[in-house]
Amino acid sequence: MQAAEPSTEPRFSIIVPAYGVEAYLRDCLDSVLSQSFKNFEVIAVNDASPDACGEIMAEYAAADPRVMAVQLEQNVGLGRARNAGMARARGTYLIFLDSDDAMLPGSLQAIARRLDETGDPELLVYDYARTYWDGRITPNTKRAVLTNSPRGAFRLDDSPGLLELLQVAWNKAYRRDFVERWGFVYPTGYYEDTPWTYPVLVAAETIAVLDRVCVHYHQRRQGSILHSTSRKHFDVFDQYELVFAFLAEHPEFERWHSALFERMTFHLRVIENMPGRLPVGARAEFRARRLQAEQTNRPAGYREPKAATSTSAARRAANRLPRPLRSAARRAYRSARRLKKPVRTAVLVAYYRAQRMLPVKKDVAVFAAYWNADYACNPAAIHRKLLELAPEIKSTWVLKPGSRNTPPPGTAVVHPGSFGFWRAMARGKYFVNNVNFPTRVVKRPGQVFVQTHHGTPLKRMGVDQIEYPLGRAELDMETLMQRVDRWDYSISANSFTTAIWERAYPAGYTSLDYGYPRNDVLVNATDEDKARAREKLGLAPGTKVVLYAPTHRDYQAVPRPLLDLEHFAQQLGQDFTVLARAHYFNLGTGPGAADGSGIVDVSGHPSVEELYLAADCLLTDYSSLMFDYALLDRPVVTFANDWEIYRATRGTYFDIHVQSPGPVVATEEDLFDVFLSGRWCDDASTKARAEFRRRFCEFDDGRAAERVVRRVFLNQENVPPVALSPEGQSRTARG
């Protein structure tokens, strides 16, 4: 007798639909592909997403045969995108995973084991936990339903509390033949999980549970459609009509009518009373539709339970009682603190409040950079272009005394915290910064805030620092997000950065994928510009110039050198000159400029862009300077001798050894060899740099500042398009 051939079907088909989640999609797919259980396929469905989701899926599909990328030509919505994935599924079980969520390690193994233990039930329900932007993780409030359910396979009658679980697709494994036999599909519109979840639970003849958290349900700070204001929330009525139509078609399930009616009533009232979901003026209409739905679907002889109503009312009353006392205590505390403040501060507060009562000046723009330390970076580049394209707009710069650079003549300058500063913050219309203005600044209606940032991130930023205590240090996440909520625009230099800003700073701003304005000068530089920069620095003709620019270390209480720069310069010999530039956090700790050492301390040089132009090579570690310098298509060498410590204490978004613009070394001996052997500028270095430029120099085409000025200050929608490189032409600049 011939033995049967082993099945080629995967155990699981994991369907991941995606739209507008490029910031989270990689983490989601990685959480699946890194599972210890390997017998599965991933069907990633790009629902015509306007960002890089489709390209990310294609990248993963090319790298792993278990991944299938489905590219939909038109946006069809979450429900139909899941249907598209189901149509291609070959697995014994279907699992759905939203593309901004993550599967915990070991989850697939635990799910497979539980299915084996319970005889391959038609449905397996497992647990989840909510994760928040600030690092909090909260358990499923209904997890007792799972722990109290029967241990073996059962029907819904044996654990009716399953109906009270969150109506979602991604906390279950569905046997595919069960789904196909019943013809279950997702409808269109909001709340598409409702007419899927309830019929599935009711119809399943065998159900099992797994009281283990398998999914982290990401609570996005902004961007969830179910928490947005829209008339699409009225879709919920159509979805419940589908639920009761299913019961009508299958009278054997009539016993569930009352329970599902109660779920509908609860759900509709939550939507009706939730602030911000229904548009202004739509609440009365929604209430009328809700009453009609309750009347239409109310079971004969149904009486609303009174105990639950009285209990919830008592709970709400109890919660209200202490509020006045707490409010009074807070007011008293604030009053006491105010009495201790200096008189000048009190006067400034009153002055700022009074200034905010005056009209916003529509022709005033306020600029700052690097915590008011300098006239530099993206804000300075935007300012210079503003003077050219819109000279009628009056500019004010916030600068501390003694800055290295000063703005052009005619620009008003105010010191931080002065009367002029608070007047500018109260009356200006446009605000441009590469960090944040103080928390006490109140954003008025009509004011526009532009966050330019100051580099492409290798290290973790914003809320992504939560897992790294040294990285976040004294960073107050709540305060940070108050500042981020003021942003109207966020500038990005590449798709990678756009996705990082979305997850690191979750708020409602518009991303301007225009390139970094500070890099325009690099893209447009000529050979004459390079010669002029070298001449200003007094560099000898023919010398090879290495710019050494390390980044700041959060784990160092006192900055200390990680490279013996004098020994390095000696090893390179007389043919090289080393320009040494300390990080702006560490000014005053440069190596000096000893005669004959081959080292020139340029920490105080007013223009890092001029240093780029003068240098033949950049030697750095994890500084964002590498992303800017790569635009010149000149060699970059990375000295990563503390990579493991840096990655563990600050966190990084990628491994610099894998995605590097050139050679990466960990010892001084290897560093010497890179330069003395010529590997710093060989063909391998050129190839690595080209790939690095393709990914991280995507939007920098020399017109970034112009695009920002035209869009933000001149209110022009049709700004000059980004001249993408041939490798990046599949992406369209957004914003």
Image (cartoon, rainbow, N blue to C red):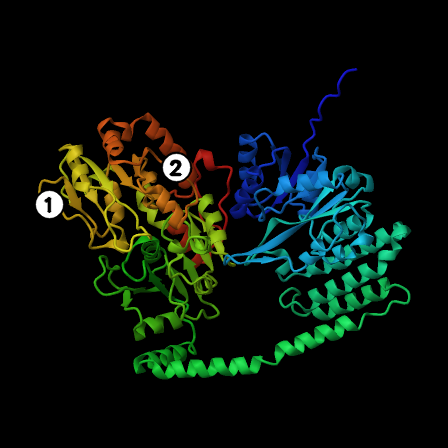
Distance from the alpha carbon under mark 2 to that under mark 1: 36 Å
**Can you tell which quarter of the image residue 82 is in?**
top right
Residue drawn at (72%, 60%) of the image: 234
Question: In this orientation, which residue lies closer to the viewer: 422 or 167?
Answer: 167
Q: Is residue 162 left or right of residue 494?
A: right
Amino acid carrying label 1: it is: Ala
Question: In this orientation, which residue lies closer to the viewer: 351 or 646?
Answer: 646
The vertical placement of 128 against 393, above or below, is above
Amino acid carrying label 2: it is: Arg
Disc 2 element: helix
**Can you tell which quarter of the image residue 689 is in?**
top left
Residue pushed farthest left?
595
Disc 1 element: loop
- Image location of residue 247, percent across then percent down: 86, 53
Can residue 649 be seen in this snapshot? Answer: yes
Question: In this orientation, which residue lies closer to the viewer: 468 or 442?
Answer: 468
Residue drawn at (36%, 57%) of the image: 434
The vertical placement of 140 against 360, above or below, is above
- Image location of residue 384, percent across then percent down: 31, 55
Q: Which mark is residue 693?
A: 2
Can residue 73 be seen in this snapshot? Answer: no
Q: Is residue 264 left or right of residue 587?
A: right
Q: Mark 1 points at which residue?
A: 594
